[in-house]
Image (cartoon, rainbow, N blue to C red):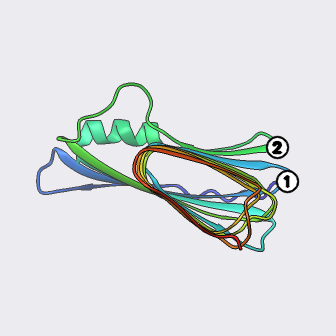
Amino acid sequence: MIKKTALATLAIALACSPALAEITIHEEHSFAAHPGSSLEIDASFHEVEITVAQTKSVDVTVDITIKGNGSSSKKLAEQLQPEFLDKGDRLIVRSTRKGRGWSWKSMSAKGKITVAMPSEMDLLVDVSSGSTTITGDMGEAAVHHDASSGSLRINGAMQELHADLSSGSVKVFVGRPLERFSADASSGSIRLEGGA
């Protein structure tokens, strides 16, 4: 049985100029964790923070703030509205902009995805721009991280780690040796420690 809690808040506060708006999105969702399943996070510019916990569910919170032109901000907020998909063995969290980009001159946006999840679940994180932090022992899980721009920080353990960043750094401290490890940072640094 899937336990689901969804709380969505969309607030628009007018700034000094009537044409400017601040839009905030706050959503929470809880997936039932299936044995052998994976969690996939697909995001545009969000900071991603993942903690491994003693839990039987995957609990996700998505927070987004958009400031700028009223109509453009509203359109971007609609595109970034989080999706929570349960595909059986794949749990998916998605908050991505669709179509053409927007002008950073007319608006700004920031987002954060916070996850508490059990061990023994594979993890795939795909972010266009943003930092990812993973803390805790993931057991025999595999972690795949792909980012165009951003950093990856890990303090924990897993069986496999694969990281691909176009621009950014990878800093990993593991509590035990990785069975498989691959990392590529076109522009940035890679550091692996621990595992003795």
In the picture shown, does residue 76 fall above or below 99?
Answer: below
Mark found first going from the N terminus, 1 or 2: 1
Quarter of the image containing the C terminus?
Answer: bottom right
Looking at the image, residue 21 sits to the left or right of residue 161; the answer is left
In the picture shown, does residue 77 fall above or below 175?
Answer: above
| Residue type pointed to by label 1 | His
Q: For the point 16% across and 44% down, which residue is it?
A: 19
| Residue type pointed to by label 2 | Asp
Q: Residues within 10 Å of mark 1 (few under 14, many from 20)?
A: some
Return the x and y of residue 33 as percentages of the image width and height: 80, 57
Looking at the image, residue 67 sits to the left or right of residue 93; the answer is left
Return the x and y of residue 2 as percentages of the image width and height: 81, 54
User: Element at badge 2?
Assistant: loop
Q: Are marks 1 and 2 in contact (CB under 8 Å)?
A: yes
Q: Which residue is mark 1?
A: 34
The answer to whether one can see residue 113 in this image is yes
Quarter of the image containing the N terminus?
Answer: bottom right
In the picture shown, does residue 193 fall above or below 34?
Answer: below
Q: Nearer the viewer, residue 127 or 87?
A: 127
Q: Which residue is mark 2?
A: 89
Return the x and y of residue 93 as percentages of the image width and height: 62, 47
- From mark 1 to mark 2, how far is it between C-alphas? 7 Å
